[in-house]
Each structure stands twice: as C-alpha cells, then as structure tokens.
Image (cartoon, grey):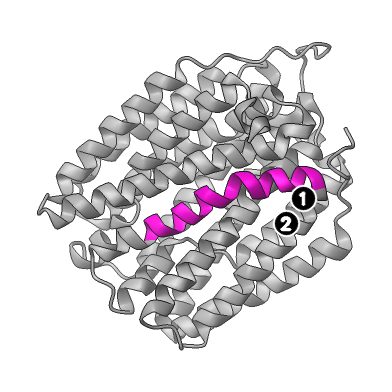
C-alpha cells in the first residue's frame, strides 16, 4: 500500500482518465449485442464481423500512433485526440437505423482507442522505475476496470428505472468529455539521453524475446474472440436484460480488485508465472462453457472467474512488453503488441461467430480453450523472459 501511494502523478491522472472513459464505454458496450439482436435483428455472424473489423483497424492505428509518438517523443497529443474521438462518437448511436451504422460507429470508437493506447502505455512506462512497472500497469488496469464496474451499474439502474437507450448514449458522451478534460493535464515525459531521430518501424521486433512473446500472444488471441459473445451467451442462458450489465460489472469489479496486487506481485516473482496462471484459468473456463453444464448461479461463478483471469494477465502483459523493449522504442513496441493481438482478433471473432451460429457454441468455446492451452505451452518453453530486477 505504501508503494501504491507513491505512484507518480502521471500514473494517477491517467488512471482517473481511464476510469471516466471506461465508465462511458462500458455503459454502452454490454448494450450493443442486445441492440443488434432485439432492435436491428442481426445475429452472431454480424456481431463477429463488426467486432473483428473494428478491432483490427484499431490495432493498425495503435502501431502507427506508437511509432509516431516515438519519433516525436510526444504522447500527449495522441492521448487527447484518441479520447476526444471516442467521446464524440458514443452519443451518435441514437441515430443508427441498421447494423452498418453500428459498424461505422464501432470503427470510429476503436480508431480513437488506437490513437491513444500505445502512446499512453509508453507514457506510463516512462513515468515509473522498473521496480514499480507491474504495479503502475496494474493500477491503471484497476482504474480502467473500476470504470467498467460503474458504467454497467449505472446502465442497469437507469434501465430498471425505465430510461430509454438514447439517454444512456448521451450520458456516455458526457463522461467521455470529462475524461478528455482530465487528460489535458498530463505532461509529456522527458527522456534524458534519448535523442529524437528517425526510427525503423520493425526495429522493436529485432529483439528476439519480444518477438517470440508477441507471436505467442497472437496465437492465444486466436482463441480469445470478442467478449460480446460471452454477453450473448449469458443472454441465451436466460439472464434478463437488466442482469447483463450487472454481470459485466461483477467481472470488472473482480478485475479491478485483483489487477494492482497481482501485477505488483509480478514485480517480485516474474511476469511469466502470472501469465501462465491466467491463461490456464481462461482455458479451463472455456472448456467449462463448452461442456453445456453452466446454469443458474454457475453463470455468475463463471464470469467472476473470468474477471480473475483478466486481473492476472492484463497489466502483466503490458509490463512484460515494457521489460522487453528499449525506452526509445517503447511506443512502437506497444504498437506491435496491439497490432498483433488485434489483427488476430479479426479471424478469431469471425471464426467464433461462424462456429457459434453454424455448429454450436460448444464447438466455438472448445476451439478457444484448445488454442489457449497451446499458447500457454509455447509461453513456457519458447519465450525467454528476463527477471523483473534486470533493466
């Protein structure tokens, strides 16, 4: 707790920015599959197409913004533009009359995420020493997930009170503007000894441990399709519309509570141990879902354990990328991290949606579990990861 309180101002400020932005995002996110299915009459294949295209395009933008922020040695402008675009887009869902409109807005929202993500993570890594790196990323993920708790809770409460969906989209836009205002107070870091120069976009991949880790992460992502399929499955298992946001809020609450201590633990025992544990939890959960024996209170247990998987991996993944990349290349390294994981999400979501609708959800979840196990084995035997104490 003492070390947690000593985190720099930049880490705290970016944490609160993410809290507000994710409260806005997660207020809308659980409602999209419901809106597609009940209002626009679109099925899982359309959902997979929308999420896959949006995330893949976002990943390309993350690589570009990370690379350019390295060349400029400036991250703030990218962070502001990314949060600003997302805040502008969310209220526009009230104007959508077809699934192509949802595709366009999700595309623009993810482009905003692409503009800000890699420069923001580079700024976080520069703000702390290596001994605090896991804790800093874990704290940021905790604040992000806390926003993901508050957003669905507000959505559930307001829907239960009879508020119409358009009003929720306008409220999400207001919270996004608040995030932009707070992001205006962050400062670009000064990097002593690092000169501004032309950089090779592929240079981060010349570091073999980072390259191998990113390939293994891409394989894992092939079995880790959009979380919207989880919400769709929960709806099919007889949860009401008002319970869906509450369920997702519970997932985010577990992730928020666990992210900081687990990521800080990786500063002491190593990143790989936490990653392996989290991926094994993921594989077990997907096999459980595929078994067809999930019902009643078991649905809530499943989603709470999914939150534990997120807590054990989200911050640790980013800390590992920072460990394996030089300071002057960190924006580009995070860009490659987002590109590879996001590019894999397009075939993952399309494949999952096709299996889900054409063969059955059991096959879709079994495939995801098998790929997760294979990626875990490769992480253990193929990826050399330095100890956290090594610069």
Q: Which mark is residue 274?
A: 2
Q: Which residue is painted at 78% across and 26% down in the image?
A: 327
Q: Residues within 10 Å of mark 2 (few under 14, many from 20)?
A: many
Q: Is residue 22 left or right of residue 331?
A: left
Q: Which image quadrant: the N terminus? A: top right
Q: Which mark is residue 72?
A: none
Q: Which residue is painted at 35% across and 45% down in the image?
A: 150
In this view, 290 is above or below 218: below
**Residue 104 visible within the image:** no
Q: Which residue is painted at 41% across and 58% down in the image?
A: 250
- The prevailing secondary structure element of the residues shown in magenta is helix
Provide residue 20's location: percent of width, then percent of height.
38, 34
Q: Residue 315: which quarter of the image?
A: top right
Query: In the rendered image, which residue does mark 1 sit on?
Result: 271
Q: Which image quadrant: the C terminus? A: top right
Q: Residue furthest front?
A: 2
Q: Is residue 360 left or right of residue 174?
A: right
Provide residue 328's location: percent of width, then percent of height.
77, 23
Q: Is residue 258 magenta?
A: yes
Residue segment shown in magenta: 248-268
> Tag 1, which secondary structure?
helix
Q: Residue 235: which quarter of the image?
A: bottom left
Q: Is residue 188 or residue 85 the one in the foreground?
A: 188
Provide residue 82's location: percent of width, then percent of height.
46, 29
Q: Which residue is painted at 61% across and 50% down in the image?
A: 314
> Tag 2, which secondary structure?
helix
Real-space Cα separation, disc 2 to disc 1, in angstroms: 6 Å
Q: Residue 33: which quarter of the image?
A: bottom left
Q: Are marks 2 and 1 in contact (CB under 8 Å)?
A: yes
């Amino acid at each position: 707790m003492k070390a947690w309180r000593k985190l720099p101002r930049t880490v705290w400020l970016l944490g609160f920015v993410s809290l507000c932005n994710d409260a806005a995002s997660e207020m809308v996110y659980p409602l999209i599959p419901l809106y597609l299915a009940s209002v626009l009459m679109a099925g899982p294949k359309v959902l997979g197409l929308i999420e896959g295209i949006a995330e893949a395009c976002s990943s390309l933008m993350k690589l570009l913004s990370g690379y350019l922020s390295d060349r400029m040695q400036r991250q703030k402008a990218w962070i502001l533009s990314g949060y600003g675009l997302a805040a502008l887009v969310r209220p526009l869902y009230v104007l959508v009359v077809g699934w192509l409109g949802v595709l366009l807005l999700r595309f623009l929202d993810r482009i905003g995420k692409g503009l800000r993500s890699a420069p923001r993570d580079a700024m976080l890594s520069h703000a702390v020493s290596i001994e605090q790196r896991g804790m800093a990323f874990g704290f940021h993920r905790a604040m992000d997930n806390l926003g993901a708790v508050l957003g669905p809770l507000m959505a559930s409460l307001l829907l239960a009170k009879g508020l119409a969906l358009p009003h929720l989209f306008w409220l999400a836009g207001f919270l996004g503007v608040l995030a932009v205002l707070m992001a205006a107070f962050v400062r670009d870091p000064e990097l002593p000894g690092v000169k501004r120069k032309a950089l090779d976009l592929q240079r981060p991949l010349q570091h073999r441990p980072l390259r191998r880790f990113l390939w293994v992460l891409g394989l894992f992502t092939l079995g880790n399709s959009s979380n919207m399929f989880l919400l769709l499955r929960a709806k099919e298992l007889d949860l009401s519309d008002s319970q869906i946001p509450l369920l997702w809020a519970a997932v985010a609450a577990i992730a928020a509570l666990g992210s900081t201590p687990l990521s800080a633990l990786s500063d002491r025992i190593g990143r790989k141990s936490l990653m392996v544990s989290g991926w094994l939890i993921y594989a077990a959960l997907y096999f459980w879902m595929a078994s067809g024996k999930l019902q009643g209170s078991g649905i809530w247990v499943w989603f709470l354990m999914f939150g534990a998987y997120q807590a054990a991996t989200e911050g640790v993944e980013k800390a590992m990328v920072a460990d394996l990349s030089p300071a002057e290349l960190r924006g580009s390294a995070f860009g490659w991290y987002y590109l590879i994981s996001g590019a894999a999400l397009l075939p993952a979501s399309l494949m999952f949606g096709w299996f889900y609708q054409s063969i059955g959800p059991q096959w879709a979840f079994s495939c995801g579990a098998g790929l997760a196990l294979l990626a875990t084995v490769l992480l253990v035997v193929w990826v050399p990861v330095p100890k956290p104490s090594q610069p």
